[in-house]
Image: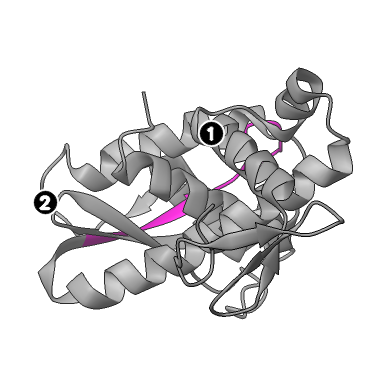
């Protein structure tokens, strides 16, 4: 069996069912790699952690840890890919997102603000400062009306075309995020990056 770290073709089986590389001497668990590969397949196919735990019989906490790791990896790969092609950016726009279950008047402070850039028929997303960090007071009625206006139109427009890659992504994101309930502020960026990855790699059907 090939080493997962250095790709050396020769590894040997240990008493605890792990394998050790003949060259780099690192150990790994084939069973864990198989579990990861299975969960990655389900993740890529759009299964939620709850669905995957049910279908595989794995503990929910275990599946959630793998899914969190997948999303972190996707976010890092997204940044690396964009860094190499940032010179190809053709359009950008800002987006204000508030879950449909929330009231724009009462929950305006919970608005998520992110920038979407388009390059080479793909998108790259970047979280912007929260409403409170921007210095806006959601309790101030004048500022609240301004934010509600932005929410109504969804964008602070920087592009001329009505239908763009960016708008297609936003439409996809609005549908994608619906199946996840109670995403925390800290985790939101990773779900946003997952949506970006799915959109860019054809998993948005």
For the C terminus, the image quarter is top left
Q: Position of residue 170 (x, y in %)?
A: 38, 41
Of the pair 38 and 203, the residue shown nearer to us: 38
Q: Secondary structure at mark 2?
A: loop
Tag 1: Cα neighbours inside 10 Å, few (<14), some, or many (≥20)?
Answer: few
Q: Which residues are magenta?
A: 92-104
Q: Relative to 201, say whether 83 is above or below.
A: below
Q: Secondary structure at mark 1?
A: helix
The residue singled out by tag 2 in the image is: 160
Q: Could you tell whether 177 is left or right of 57 in the image?
A: left
The residue singled out by tag 1 in the image is: 41
Q: Relative to 159, say whether 87 is above or below.
A: below
| Quarter of the rendering containing residue 80 | bottom left
Marks 2 and 1 sit apart, C-alpha to C-alpha, by: 39 Å
Of the pair 182 and 23, the residue shown nearer to us: 23
Q: Position of residue 116 (x, y in %)?
A: 34, 59
């Amino acid at each position: 069996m090939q080493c997962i770290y250095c790709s050396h073709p020769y590894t040997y089986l240990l008493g605890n069912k792990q394998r050790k590389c003949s060259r780099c001497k690192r150990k790994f668990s084939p069973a864990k790699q198989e579990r990861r590969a299975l969960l990655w397949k389900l993740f890529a196919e759009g299964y939620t952690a709850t669905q995957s735990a049910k279908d595989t019989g794995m503990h929910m906490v275990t599946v959630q840890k793998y899914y969190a790791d997948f999303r972190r990896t996707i976010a890092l790969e997204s940044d690396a890919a964009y860094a190499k092609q940032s010179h190809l950016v053709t359009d950008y726009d800002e987006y204000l997102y508030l879950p449909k279950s929330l009231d724009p008047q009462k929950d305006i402070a919970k608005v998520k603000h992110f920038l979407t850039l388009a390059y080479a028929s793909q998108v790259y997303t970047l979280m912007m400062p929260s409403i409170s960090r921007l210095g806006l007071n959601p309790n101030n009625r004048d500022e609240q009306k301004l934010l509600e206006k932005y929410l109504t139109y969804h964008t602070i427009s920087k592009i001329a075309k009505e239908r763009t890659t960016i708008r297609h992504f936003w439409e996809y994101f609005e549908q994608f995020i619906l199946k996840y309930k109670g995403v925390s502020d800290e985790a939101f960026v990773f779900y946003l990056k997952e949506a970006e990855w799915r959109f860019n790699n054809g998993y948005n059907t």
